[in-house]
């Protein structure tokens, strides 16, 4: 799904300790991709020990997170809650208690369900008009980017690294965005072990930088959706871009090529600058 290869991960391990080490490397990479498990990040409900011991609840949490992150073309049931029986030995007596474990929330086809807007209605009720909207936005963007000999063709694939967004904001506001302010070539790292980590982080940095520029330009605050995404950072103050653009238009959504989020960001720009010469 990511096109990366992890170094030093043997295909077959016979010893239990070797299996744990292999699983640890794989989960470390998966957690980074999901944006969880790090310092001041959402702590996942799975671990090397729980997965290795075949804890079904932990495995399900991990699979649900992967399905949501990679926008798998399947529909998960909403609000799935399972009963988990926890058995503990106390004073030589087995005690058990039952707890509810929530596996899924309330989703639309692509992510956590939020207050519906014009783009939801457009995709649901008039998908034939989507190409018209995309063409208008591409024309608007290229009218600016052509000034520096750049051009985009596909909204779905050419904004996720944040470079065009940063340069576009500079053109719209009349200033030059220094290339040292962004990673202008996010895919320059080719060490296989760090390939996805570097490119994802660089793209995320660029999109965050673009959001900061949008806020400096006084763009309206978009509607937010309920918190609880797998990439939500906890236990630290949010950055300004996370606070203003959290939820519906998360930087991670743009990097993950979420079409609705990208359309919303571009339409915000179009609404403010459509009459710009």
Image (cartoon, rainbow, N blue to C red):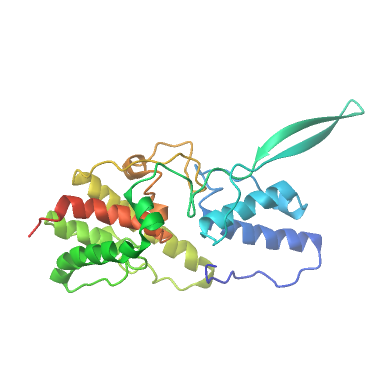
Q: Position of residue 87 (x, y in %)?
A: 83, 35
Q: Of residues 200 and 110, which is closer to you in this image?
A: 110
Query: What residue is rendered at 20% in x and 45% in y?
Result: 216
Q: Is residue 83 above or below residue 211?
A: above
Q: Quadrant of the N terminus?
A: bottom right
In the current view of this chain or complex, which residue is farthest to the front? 125
Asked which quadrant contains residue 127, the reply is bottom left
Which image quadrant: the C terminus?
bottom left
98 lies left or right of 277:
right
So how many labels did they put on this image? 0
Relative image position of residue 72 (x, y in whole percent): 54, 61
In the displayed structure image, the side of residue 102 where residue 192 appears, left or right: left
Front-most of residues 114 and 24: 114
Q: Relative to residue 79, is residue 195 depicted above or below?
A: below
The location of residue 268, given as percent across then percent down, is 24, 51
User: From this viewpoint, which residue is outermost toward the left?
Assistant: 277
Q: Is residue 42 above or below residue 190?
A: above
Q: Residue at x 79, y 35 (%)?
A: 86
Q: Is residue 153 visible?
A: yes
Residue 205 visible within the image: no
Q: Is residue 227 left or right of residue 215?
A: right
**Residue at point 36% right, 65% down?**
156
Percent position of residue 267, x then y = 25, 54
What residue is drawn where x is 27% and y is 48%?
Answer: 212
Q: Residue furthest right?
A: 92
Quarter of image, res 31: bottom right
User: Would residue 202 be found to the left or right of residue 151 on screen?
Assistant: right
């Amino acid at each position: 799904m990511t096109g990366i290869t992890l170094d030093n991960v043997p295909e077959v391990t016979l010893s239990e300790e070797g299996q744990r080490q292999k699983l640890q490397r794989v989960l470390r990479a998966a957690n980074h991709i999901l944006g969880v498990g790090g310092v001041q990040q959402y702590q996942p409900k799975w671990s090397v020990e729980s997965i290795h011991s075949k804890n079904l609840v932990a495995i399900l949490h991990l699979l649900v997170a992967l399905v949501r992150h990679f926008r798998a073309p399947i529909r998960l049931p909403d609000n799935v809650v399972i009963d988990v029986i926890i058995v503990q030995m106390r004073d030589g007596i087995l005690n058990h208690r039952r707890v509810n474990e929530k596996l899924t929330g309330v989703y639309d086809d692509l992510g956590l369900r939020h207050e519906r807007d014009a783009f939801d209605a457009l995709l649901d009720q008039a998908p034939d008009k989507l190409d018209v909207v995309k063409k208008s936005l591409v024309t608007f963007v290229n009218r600016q980017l052509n000034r520096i000999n750049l051009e985009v063709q596909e909204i779905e694939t050419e904004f996720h690294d944040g470079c065009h967004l940063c340069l576009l904001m500079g053109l719209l506001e009349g200033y030059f965005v220094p290339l040292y302010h962004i990673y202008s070539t996010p895919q320059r790292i080719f060490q296989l072990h760090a390939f996805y980590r570097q490119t994802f982080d660089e793209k995320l940095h660029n999109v965050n930088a673009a959001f900061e520029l949008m806020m400096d330009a006084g763009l309206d605050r978009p509607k937010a959706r309920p918190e609880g995404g797998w990439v939500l950072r906890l236990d630290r103050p949010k950055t300004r871009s996370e606070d203003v653009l959290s939820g519906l238009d998360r930087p991670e959504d743009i990097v993950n090529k979420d079409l609705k989020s990208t359309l919303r960001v571009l339409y915000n720009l179009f609404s403010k600058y459509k009459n710009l010469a």
